[in-house]
Image: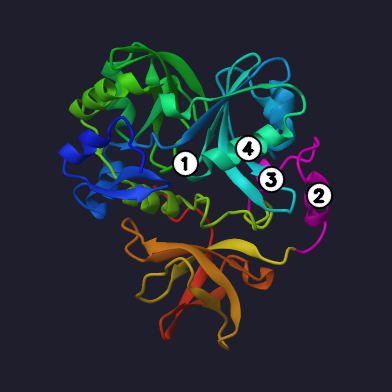
Amino acid sequence: MKNTALTSTHEALGAKMVSFAGYNMPVQYDGVNIEHEAVRKDVGVFDVSHMGEFLIEGPNALALIRKVSSNDASKLTVGKAQYSCLPNDDGGIVDDLLIYKIKEEQYLLVVNASNIEKDWNWIYSKNDVGAEMKDVSEAYSLLAIQGPNAVEKMQPLSSHDLSEIKFYNFIVGDFAGIEHVIISATGYTGSGGFEIYCKNEDVKQIWDRVTQAGAKPIGLAARDTLRLEMGYSLYGNDIDDTTSPLEAGLGWITKFTKHFTNSENLAEQKKHVLKRKLVAFELDDKGIPRSGYDIVDNAGNHIGKVTSGTMSPSLKKGIGLGYVSPVFSDFGSKINIQIRKNAIPATVVKLPFYKG
């Protein structure tokens, strides 16, 4: 297993460590519900340094990014970020990612930890335009500082006005005594805050200053319940090599104003009724839906699968995401989640689950 620059820090704090995407990561410290509530009501800090970072540079950087990604990176200006995905040749998704425009002819791509090698090889295989590619994943750390009090409690650590960093924008500046770090506001929890990209040798100082300023250490288990309450897709669960971005509700990041990998087939798919759709549901009775559980209709017929599910700490009820036949995808549709021998009634709802 690989370690992050903060692994020994997490161990010293008594975190429960698990293998995640090949990294030794903290899954929880004081308990999922306690950590979840800290982010919803105050501020928490996650070590997500296992994520991958690629630099795409040079005069043909944008051409390569537009070719491999579904969203249109030509809309980005310096200081802005964009959510996108990498379609494969078969209608599925290689990965979802963030694209930052650092400066003219330089972009930062942030990819999922489990897909670093896969994504690199995929983008490299499509690079027939001579764009410069650098994998800097091993050199950089990433902290996510999340919660309604993030800006207020972290403001003393920077000379920049953190409240002015709008959603999906970023600056390069000083933070916690370290110069030239990326401070961005992309979020994955729905409770506000920002992310810090820094060199590995600087992350311990930043972590210490951030926790001293009042951020509670949060593990990956609470990160999962927080993202699920917002209905954010998790690669490997809700989207993968077999799921179309249109089926997954990612039509808003699939821009047919340009050519990209498999765009013709996806454009054709958009003209027809989809075979399945990703929906959000809440259980009407007690129960906890889990990934892999069958979704059935009132007659017990199989109509889909749960891809993510949990007991929502905020709503105190079972919530989940899953693919179903389109006829069951409308808000208010009644479905059932097969939990062992019981078919638990559920209702298809509009995201997010957590309204704040």
Disc 2 to disc 4, C-alpha distance: 25 Å
* Label at residue 267: 2
* Label at residue 113: 1
Q: Position of residue 159 (x, y in %)?
A: 34, 11
Indicate the amino acid at tag 3.
Pro
Badge 4 crowding class, 10 Å Cα cut-off, few under 14, some 14 to 19, many 20 or more, is: few
Q: Which residue is at 57% across, 81% downward? A: 297
Towards the viewer: 171 or 18: 18
Which numbered disc flags the more N-terminal residue, 1 or 3? 3
Which numbered disc flags the more N-terminal residue, 2 or 4? 4
Towards the viewer: 308 or 11: 11
Indicate the amino acid at tag 4.
Asn
Disc 2 to disc 3, C-alpha distance: 12 Å
Image: magenta residue range: 249-273
Q: Position of residue 168 (x, y in %)?
A: 52, 30
Q: Which residue is mark 4?
A: 121
Q: Is residue 46 magenta?
A: no
* Label at residue 87: 3
**Mark 2 or mark 4, which is nearer to you?**
4
Towards the viewer: 115 or 13: 115
Q: Secondary structure at mark 4?
A: helix
Disc 1 to disc 3, C-alpha distance: 18 Å
Indicate the amino acid at tag 1.
Ala
Which numbered disc flags the more N-terminal residue, 4 or 1? 1
**Mark 3 or mark 4, which is nearer to you?**
4
Which numbered disc flags the more N-terminal residue, 2 or 1? 1
Indicate the amino acid at tag 2.
Ala
Q: Which residue is at 74% across, 34% downward? A: 67
Disc 4 to disc 1, C-alpha distance: 14 Å
Disc 3 to disc 4, C-alpha distance: 14 Å
User: Does the CB distance between marks 1 and 3 fall below 8 Å?
Assistant: no
Q: Quadrant of residue 206?
A: top left
